[in-house]
Amino acid sequence: MTTSPMFDLECINIAKSFGAFRAVKDVSFNIPSGSFFSILGPSGCGKTTLMRMIAGFEEPTGGDIQIKGKSVLGTPPNKRNVKMVFQHLALFPMMNVFENIAYGLRCNGVSNSEIKKKVHDVLERIALPDVAEREIHQLSGGQKQRIAIARCMVLDPDVLLLDEPLGALDLKLREQMKIELKLLQHQFNTTFVYITHDQSEALVMSDNVAIMNQGRFEQIGTPQELYHRPSTAFVAGFVGDSNRWSGKVKTSDGSGGKVATEQGLEMAFTAAHGETIREGTEVDIFVRPEFIHTVRKTGSVGTGEAADNSMDGVVDSLLFNGANSRVLVRSAKGELIEADVTLTGNDDVKPGEEVSLVWSSKQAMCFAAQGAS
Ligand code: ATP
Protein backbone atom coordinates (compact mmCIF):
# COMPACT_ATOMS: atom_id res chain seq x y z
CA MET A 1 0.00 0.00 0.00
CA THR A 2 1.37 3.45 -0.86
CA THR A 3 2.03 5.73 2.05
CA SER A 4 2.43 9.45 2.35
CA PRO A 5 4.90 10.61 5.01
CA MET A 6 3.51 14.15 4.97
CA PHE A 7 0.49 12.99 7.01
CA ASP A 8 0.77 12.45 10.76
CA LEU A 9 -2.36 10.29 10.62
CA GLU A 10 -4.04 8.54 7.74
CA CYS A 11 -7.10 6.28 7.95
CA ILE A 12 -7.86 4.21 4.88
CA ASN A 13 -11.32 2.59 4.60
CA ILE A 14 -11.50 2.02 8.33
CA ALA A 15 -14.45 -0.11 9.42
CA LYS A 16 -15.65 -1.55 12.72
CA SER A 17 -18.51 -3.97 13.27
CA PHE A 18 -19.82 -5.19 16.60
CA GLY A 19 -21.51 -8.44 15.53
CA ALA A 20 -23.88 -7.47 12.71
CA PHE A 21 -23.85 -3.78 13.70
CA ARG A 22 -21.57 -1.57 11.60
CA ALA A 23 -20.46 1.25 13.91
CA VAL A 24 -17.83 2.71 11.51
CA LYS A 25 -18.23 2.27 7.75
CA ASP A 26 -15.27 2.73 5.38
CA VAL A 27 -13.98 5.99 6.77
CA SER A 28 -10.97 7.52 4.97
CA PHE A 29 -9.13 10.72 5.82
CA ASN A 30 -5.66 12.11 6.35
CA ILE A 31 -4.38 14.89 8.55
CA PRO A 32 -1.50 17.15 7.54
CA SER A 33 1.23 17.63 10.15
CA GLY A 34 0.59 20.04 12.97
CA SER A 35 -3.07 20.73 12.31
CA PHE A 36 -6.19 20.74 14.46
CA PHE A 37 -8.72 18.23 13.13
CA SER A 38 -12.14 17.64 14.67
CA ILE A 39 -14.61 14.84 14.22
CA LEU A 40 -18.09 16.26 14.82
CA GLY A 41 -21.28 14.26 14.90
CA PRO A 42 -24.36 13.39 16.94
CA SER A 43 -24.29 10.95 19.83
CA GLY A 44 -23.87 7.35 18.68
CA CYS A 45 -22.48 8.16 15.21
CA GLY A 46 -19.22 6.27 15.87
CA LYS A 47 -16.78 9.01 16.93
CA THR A 48 -15.47 7.28 20.05
CA THR A 49 -15.16 3.94 18.27
CA LEU A 50 -13.06 5.59 15.55
CA MET A 51 -10.89 7.33 18.14
CA ARG A 52 -10.39 4.09 20.09
CA MET A 53 -9.20 2.39 16.92
CA ILE A 54 -6.66 5.17 16.27
CA ALA A 55 -5.44 4.88 19.88
CA GLY A 56 -5.22 1.09 19.62
CA PHE A 57 -7.92 0.18 22.18
CA GLU A 58 -10.04 -1.44 19.44
CA GLU A 59 -8.88 -3.29 16.33
CA PRO A 60 -10.68 -2.33 13.11
CA THR A 61 -12.57 -5.04 11.22
CA GLY A 62 -11.37 -3.51 7.94
CA GLY A 63 -8.97 -0.91 6.54
CA ASP A 64 -5.66 0.51 7.69
CA ILE A 65 -4.44 3.17 10.13
CA GLN A 66 -1.08 4.78 9.47
CA ILE A 67 0.89 7.09 11.74
CA LYS A 68 3.63 9.02 9.93
CA GLY A 69 3.18 6.72 6.94
CA LYS A 70 3.47 3.41 8.84
CA SER A 71 0.62 1.01 9.56
CA VAL A 72 -0.07 0.60 13.28
CA LEU A 73 -2.52 -2.28 12.95
CA GLY A 74 -1.73 -4.86 15.62
CA THR A 75 0.49 -2.39 17.54
CA PRO A 76 -0.66 -2.07 21.18
CA PRO A 77 -1.68 1.40 22.46
CA ASN A 78 1.50 1.94 24.51
CA LYS A 79 3.68 1.22 21.46
CA ARG A 80 1.88 3.75 19.20
CA ASN A 81 3.17 7.27 19.41
CA VAL A 82 -0.38 8.48 20.02
CA LYS A 83 -1.67 9.85 23.31
CA MET A 84 -5.23 10.47 24.42
CA VAL A 85 -6.91 12.98 26.74
CA PHE A 86 -10.18 11.62 28.11
CA GLN A 87 -13.26 13.61 29.11
CA HIS A 88 -12.61 12.81 32.77
CA LEU A 89 -8.90 13.59 32.30
CA ALA A 90 -7.82 10.51 34.33
CA LEU A 91 -5.23 12.42 36.38
CA PHE A 92 -3.90 10.42 39.35
CA PRO A 93 -5.41 12.07 42.48
CA MET A 94 -2.80 10.57 44.83
CA MET A 95 0.13 12.11 42.93
CA ASN A 96 1.09 15.77 42.70
CA VAL A 97 1.33 17.61 39.37
CA PHE A 98 5.02 16.78 38.90
CA GLU A 99 4.46 13.05 39.43
CA ASN A 100 1.39 13.02 37.17
CA ILE A 101 3.41 14.50 34.32
CA ALA A 102 6.49 12.39 35.10
CA TYR A 103 4.56 9.12 35.17
CA GLY A 104 4.84 8.22 31.47
CA LEU A 105 8.51 9.22 31.37
CA ARG A 106 9.26 6.96 34.37
CA CYS A 107 7.46 4.07 32.63
CA ASN A 108 9.73 4.68 29.62
CA GLY A 109 12.85 4.47 31.82
CA VAL A 110 13.88 8.12 31.40
CA SER A 111 16.53 9.29 33.91
CA ASN A 112 15.54 11.44 36.91
CA SER A 113 17.50 14.47 35.73
CA GLU A 114 15.93 14.27 32.26
CA ILE A 115 12.45 13.86 33.80
CA LYS A 116 12.96 16.97 35.91
CA LYS A 117 13.99 19.01 32.89
CA LYS A 118 11.15 17.75 30.67
CA VAL A 119 8.45 18.28 33.32
CA HIS A 120 9.60 21.83 34.00
CA ASP A 121 9.84 22.57 30.26
CA VAL A 122 6.31 21.38 29.59
CA LEU A 123 4.94 23.33 32.59
CA GLU A 124 6.55 26.46 31.15
CA ARG A 125 4.95 25.79 27.78
CA ILE A 126 1.47 25.48 29.24
CA ALA A 127 2.09 28.69 31.24
CA LEU A 128 1.85 26.96 34.64
CA PRO A 129 5.51 27.03 35.77
CA ASP A 130 4.74 27.14 39.49
CA VAL A 131 2.31 24.30 40.08
CA ALA A 132 4.69 21.29 40.06
CA GLU A 133 4.29 20.62 43.80
CA ARG A 134 0.52 21.14 43.91
CA GLU A 135 -1.90 18.33 44.56
CA ILE A 136 -4.46 17.70 41.79
CA HIS A 137 -7.38 18.78 44.01
CA GLN A 138 -5.69 22.18 44.46
CA LEU A 139 -6.02 22.98 40.74
CA SER A 140 -8.86 24.79 38.98
CA GLY A 141 -10.82 23.01 36.25
CA GLY A 142 -8.89 24.83 33.51
CA GLN A 143 -5.54 24.03 35.14
CA LYS A 144 -6.46 20.34 35.35
CA GLN A 145 -7.19 20.39 31.61
CA ARG A 146 -3.78 21.84 30.87
CA ILE A 147 -2.02 19.33 33.13
CA ALA A 148 -3.84 16.47 31.37
CA ILE A 149 -2.54 17.81 28.05
CA ALA A 150 0.97 18.40 29.46
CA ARG A 151 1.07 14.82 30.74
CA CYS A 152 0.57 13.62 27.15
CA MET A 153 2.72 16.26 25.42
CA VAL A 154 5.76 15.56 27.61
CA LEU A 155 5.96 12.22 25.76
CA ASP A 156 6.19 14.04 22.42
CA PRO A 157 3.40 12.15 20.61
CA ASP A 158 2.92 12.28 16.82
CA VAL A 159 -0.82 12.71 17.40
CA LEU A 160 -2.84 13.83 20.43
CA LEU A 161 -6.40 12.51 20.61
CA LEU A 162 -8.92 14.47 22.68
CA ASP A 163 -12.23 12.80 23.49
CA GLU A 164 -14.71 15.56 24.43
CA PRO A 165 -12.33 16.93 27.09
CA LEU A 166 -14.46 20.04 27.67
CA GLY A 167 -17.71 18.13 28.20
CA ALA A 168 -17.56 18.21 32.00
CA LEU A 169 -16.77 21.95 32.31
CA ASP A 170 -19.22 24.75 32.97
CA LEU A 171 -20.15 27.02 30.07
CA LYS A 172 -17.84 29.93 30.89
CA LEU A 173 -14.77 27.74 31.37
CA ARG A 174 -15.62 25.80 28.21
CA GLU A 175 -15.59 29.06 26.23
CA GLN A 176 -12.15 29.98 27.66
CA MET A 177 -10.74 26.51 27.13
CA LYS A 178 -11.75 26.46 23.45
CA ILE A 179 -9.40 29.36 22.82
CA GLU A 180 -6.75 27.96 25.11
CA LEU A 181 -6.74 24.55 23.44
CA LYS A 182 -6.30 26.17 20.05
CA LEU A 183 -3.37 28.23 21.39
CA LEU A 184 -1.82 25.14 23.00
CA GLN A 185 -2.08 23.24 19.73
CA HIS A 186 -0.25 26.08 17.95
CA GLN A 187 2.31 26.22 20.71
CA PHE A 188 3.16 22.50 20.51
CA ASN A 189 2.63 22.35 16.73
CA THR A 190 1.40 18.78 17.16
CA THR A 191 -1.55 17.23 15.35
CA PHE A 192 -4.65 17.30 17.58
CA VAL A 193 -7.65 15.12 16.76
CA TYR A 194 -10.64 16.31 18.74
CA ILE A 195 -14.00 14.59 18.93
CA THR A 196 -17.15 16.37 19.94
CA HIS A 197 -20.87 16.63 19.33
CA ASP A 198 -20.67 20.40 20.00
CA GLN A 199 -20.40 22.29 16.72
CA SER A 200 -19.26 25.53 18.33
CA GLU A 201 -16.20 23.75 19.76
CA ALA A 202 -15.33 22.15 16.43
CA LEU A 203 -15.86 25.28 14.33
CA VAL A 204 -13.91 27.61 16.61
CA MET A 205 -10.83 25.46 17.13
CA SER A 206 -10.29 23.42 14.00
CA ASP A 207 -8.34 23.79 10.78
CA ASN A 208 -10.51 21.01 9.34
CA VAL A 209 -13.63 19.25 10.55
CA ALA A 210 -15.14 15.90 9.53
CA ILE A 211 -18.90 15.62 9.93
CA MET A 212 -19.79 12.07 10.97
CA ASN A 213 -23.23 10.52 10.69
CA GLN A 214 -24.25 6.88 11.22
CA GLY A 215 -20.71 5.56 10.96
CA ARG A 216 -19.72 7.52 7.84
CA PHE A 217 -18.03 10.82 7.10
CA GLU A 218 -20.50 13.09 5.28
CA GLN A 219 -18.01 15.88 4.53
CA ILE A 220 -14.53 17.04 5.49
CA GLY A 221 -13.74 20.72 5.17
CA THR A 222 -12.70 23.93 6.82
CA PRO A 223 -15.31 25.37 9.20
CA GLN A 224 -16.09 28.01 6.54
CA GLU A 225 -16.63 25.39 3.80
CA LEU A 226 -18.93 23.32 5.99
CA TYR A 227 -20.97 26.36 6.93
CA HIS A 228 -21.23 28.02 3.53
CA ARG A 229 -20.97 25.06 1.17
CA PRO A 230 -22.41 21.99 2.89
CA SER A 231 -22.37 19.04 0.51
CA THR A 232 -25.23 17.09 2.09
CA ALA A 233 -28.56 17.96 3.68
CA PHE A 234 -27.32 16.42 6.92
CA VAL A 235 -24.36 18.81 7.05
CA ALA A 236 -26.57 21.80 6.18
CA GLY A 237 -28.92 20.90 9.02
CA PHE A 238 -26.23 19.93 11.56
CA VAL A 239 -23.74 22.78 11.13
CA GLY A 240 -25.17 26.17 12.06
CA ASP A 241 -28.85 27.04 12.40
CA SER A 242 -31.22 26.73 9.46
CA ASN A 243 -34.85 27.02 8.52
CA ARG A 244 -35.81 23.90 6.59
CA TRP A 245 -38.54 23.35 4.02
CA SER A 246 -39.47 20.22 2.08
CA GLY A 247 -41.19 20.28 -1.31
CA LYS A 248 -41.24 19.29 -4.96
CA VAL A 249 -39.41 21.09 -7.78
CA LYS A 250 -41.79 22.79 -10.25
CA THR A 251 -39.21 24.29 -12.61
CA SER A 252 -35.43 23.96 -12.75
CA ASP A 253 -32.50 24.45 -15.08
CA GLY A 254 -30.45 22.07 -12.91
CA SER A 255 -28.72 24.76 -10.89
CA GLY A 256 -31.81 26.61 -9.66
CA GLY A 257 -35.52 27.11 -10.11
CA LYS A 258 -38.74 27.03 -8.13
CA VAL A 259 -40.11 24.64 -5.54
CA ALA A 260 -43.65 24.21 -4.23
CA THR A 261 -43.15 23.59 -0.52
CA GLU A 262 -45.37 21.28 1.52
CA GLN A 263 -46.80 24.38 3.21
CA GLY A 264 -47.90 25.84 -0.14
CA LEU A 265 -45.11 28.41 -0.57
CA GLU A 266 -43.50 28.90 -3.98
CA MET A 267 -39.77 29.33 -3.30
CA ALA A 268 -36.93 30.23 -5.65
CA PHE A 269 -33.86 28.14 -4.85
CA THR A 270 -30.25 27.47 -5.82
CA ALA A 271 -28.95 23.91 -6.05
CA ALA A 272 -26.48 23.25 -3.22
CA HIS A 273 -22.81 22.82 -4.08
CA GLY A 274 -22.35 19.68 -6.18
CA GLU A 275 -26.10 19.06 -6.64
CA THR A 276 -28.07 19.04 -9.89
CA ILE A 277 -31.76 19.46 -9.16
CA ARG A 278 -34.29 18.33 -11.79
CA GLU A 279 -37.97 19.12 -12.21
CA GLY A 280 -40.24 16.84 -10.17
CA THR A 281 -37.54 16.02 -7.57
CA GLU A 282 -38.48 15.90 -3.89
CA VAL A 283 -36.11 18.30 -2.13
CA ASP A 284 -35.10 19.84 1.17
CA ILE A 285 -34.26 23.54 1.27
CA PHE A 286 -32.20 25.23 3.98
CA VAL A 287 -32.07 28.98 4.65
CA ARG A 288 -29.95 30.34 7.50
CA PRO A 289 -31.64 32.88 9.83
CA GLU A 290 -29.03 35.55 9.08
CA PHE A 291 -30.07 35.57 5.41
CA ILE A 292 -33.78 36.16 6.12
CA HIS A 293 -34.67 39.82 6.47
CA THR A 294 -37.62 41.05 8.44
CA VAL A 295 -39.46 43.85 6.67
CA ARG A 296 -42.07 45.87 8.54
CA LYS A 297 -44.70 47.97 6.85
CA THR A 298 -42.66 51.13 7.44
CA GLY A 299 -39.23 49.89 6.36
CA SER A 300 -36.70 47.14 6.84
CA VAL A 301 -35.12 45.58 9.89
CA GLY A 302 -31.78 44.27 8.65
CA THR A 303 -30.37 44.66 5.16
CA GLY A 304 -29.33 42.28 2.48
CA GLU A 305 -29.00 41.39 -1.16
CA ALA A 306 -31.93 41.51 -3.57
CA ALA A 307 -34.55 39.10 -2.32
CA ASP A 308 -36.67 37.01 -4.68
CA ASN A 309 -38.52 35.11 -1.95
CA SER A 310 -41.02 36.49 0.50
CA MET A 311 -43.57 35.36 3.03
CA ASP A 312 -45.95 37.27 5.30
CA GLY A 313 -46.31 36.51 8.97
CA VAL A 314 -46.79 37.77 12.49
CA VAL A 315 -43.97 38.20 15.00
CA ASP A 316 -44.35 35.44 17.57
CA SER A 317 -41.39 36.29 19.81
CA LEU A 318 -37.98 37.91 19.99
CA LEU A 319 -34.97 36.07 21.37
CA PHE A 320 -32.61 38.73 22.66
CA ASN A 321 -28.93 37.95 22.18
CA GLY A 322 -27.12 41.27 22.37
CA ALA A 323 -26.58 43.07 19.05
CA ASN A 324 -27.87 40.22 16.90
CA SER A 325 -31.20 38.98 18.09
CA ARG A 326 -33.53 36.46 16.56
CA VAL A 327 -37.13 36.99 15.62
CA LEU A 328 -39.58 34.09 15.36
CA VAL A 329 -42.30 34.77 12.79
CA ARG A 330 -45.40 32.61 12.35
CA SER A 331 -46.82 32.33 8.84
CA ALA A 332 -50.54 32.03 8.02
CA LYS A 333 -49.96 28.27 7.57
CA GLY A 334 -48.53 28.02 11.10
CA GLU A 335 -44.84 27.62 10.20
CA LEU A 336 -42.37 29.23 12.60
CA ILE A 337 -39.52 30.90 10.72
CA GLU A 338 -36.34 32.17 12.38
CA ALA A 339 -34.66 35.37 11.17
CA ASP A 340 -31.77 37.31 12.67
CA VAL A 341 -32.21 41.03 13.15
CA THR A 342 -29.88 43.77 14.27
CA LEU A 343 -31.89 45.58 16.89
CA THR A 344 -31.40 49.30 17.25
CA GLY A 345 -33.15 49.59 20.60
CA ASN A 346 -35.93 52.07 19.81
CA ASP A 347 -37.70 50.56 16.82
CA ASP A 348 -37.58 46.87 17.57
CA VAL A 349 -40.25 44.68 16.01
CA LYS A 350 -42.81 43.62 18.60
CA PRO A 351 -44.71 40.37 19.14
CA GLY A 352 -48.03 40.56 17.31
CA GLU A 353 -46.67 42.89 14.60
CA GLU A 354 -47.35 41.95 10.97
CA VAL A 355 -44.15 41.66 8.92
CA SER A 356 -42.82 40.21 5.68
CA LEU A 357 -39.80 37.95 5.56
CA VAL A 358 -37.64 38.21 2.44
CA TRP A 359 -34.64 36.21 1.29
CA SER A 360 -32.62 35.54 -1.81
CA SER A 361 -32.77 32.33 -3.83
CA LYS A 362 -28.95 32.38 -3.61
CA GLN A 363 -29.28 31.67 0.10
CA ALA A 364 -31.90 28.93 -0.34
CA MET A 365 -29.65 25.82 -0.48
CA CYS A 366 -31.50 22.97 -2.15
CA PHE A 367 -30.70 19.23 -1.82
CA ALA A 368 -32.46 16.25 -3.36
CA ALA A 369 -34.31 14.55 -0.49
CA GLN A 370 -32.69 11.31 0.70
CA GLY A 371 -33.98 8.54 -1.54
CA ALA A 372 -35.09 10.99 -4.28
CA SER A 373 -33.69 10.27 -7.74
P1 ATP B 1 -21.25 9.59 22.00
O1 ATP B 1 -21.05 11.00 21.47
O2 ATP B 1 -22.60 9.39 22.62
O3 ATP B 1 -20.12 9.08 22.84
P2 ATP B 1 -20.20 8.27 19.64
O4 ATP B 1 -20.44 9.00 18.38
O5 ATP B 1 -18.88 8.38 20.27
O6 ATP B 1 -21.33 8.64 20.70
P3 ATP B 1 -19.74 5.43 19.74
O7 ATP B 1 -19.54 5.38 21.22
O8 ATP B 1 -18.57 5.26 18.88
O9 ATP B 1 -20.54 6.74 19.33
O10 ATP B 1 -20.82 4.30 19.37
C1 ATP B 1 -21.25 4.09 18.02
C2 ATP B 1 -22.24 2.96 18.01
O11 ATP B 1 -21.56 1.72 18.28
C3 ATP B 1 -23.34 3.06 19.06
O12 ATP B 1 -24.56 2.61 18.51
C4 ATP B 1 -22.88 2.13 20.17
O13 ATP B 1 -23.97 1.60 20.88
C5 ATP B 1 -22.15 1.05 19.37
N1 ATP B 1 -21.06 0.43 20.16
C6 ATP B 1 -19.96 1.06 20.64
N2 ATP B 1 -19.17 0.19 21.30
C7 ATP B 1 -19.78 -1.03 21.24
C8 ATP B 1 -19.47 -2.35 21.73
N3 ATP B 1 -18.33 -2.58 22.40
N4 ATP B 1 -20.34 -3.34 21.44
C9 ATP B 1 -21.47 -3.11 20.74
N5 ATP B 1 -21.83 -1.89 20.25
C10 ATP B 1 -21.00 -0.87 20.50
Image (cartoon, rainbow, N blue to C red):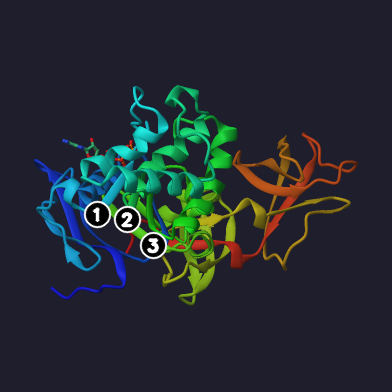
Q: Quadrant of ligand 1?
A: top left
- Alpha-carbon distance for marks 3 and 2? 19 Å
Mark 1 sits near ligand 1, with its Cβ under 8 Å away: no
Q: For the residue with label 3, is its CB less than 8 Å from the closest atom of ligand 1?
A: no
Contact between labelled residues 2 and 1, with CB atoms less than 8 Å apart: yes
User: Which quadrant is the N terminus positioned in?
Assistant: bottom left
Q: Can residue 164 be seen? A: no
Sequence-first disc among 3 and 2: 2
The residues bearing labels 3 and 1 have C-alpha atoms spaced at a distance of: 25 Å
Residue 354 visible? The answer is: yes
Residue type at numbered disc 1: Asn
Q: Dot 1 surroundings within 10 Å: few (below 14), some, or many (20 or more)?
A: some
Q: Residue at x 33, y 54 (%)?
A: 156
Closer to the N terminus: mark 1 or mark 2?
Answer: 1
- Nearest to viewer (mark 3 / mark 1): 1
Label 2 packing within 10 angstroms: few (<14), some (14-19), many (20+)? many
Seen in the picture, residue 226 relative to 194 is either above or below; the reply is: below
Kindly identify the amino acid type of the residue bearing the numbered disc 3. Ile
Question: Which numbered disc, 3 or 1, marks the residue that appears first in the sequence?
Answer: 1
Seen in the picture, residue 93 relative to 142 is either above or below; the reply is: above
Q: What residue would you read off at disc 2?
A: 159
At label 2, which amino acid type do we have?
Val
**Gap in Å between the C-alphas at discs 1 and 2?**
7 Å
80 versus 103 height, above or below: below
Q: Position of residue 100 (x, y in %)?
A: 35, 34
Tag 2 secondary structure? strand
Residue 220's disc is: 3
Q: Position of residue 22 (x, y in %)?
A: 17, 47
Marks 3, 2: nearer the viewer: 2
Number of the label disc, if any, that sits on residue 81: 1
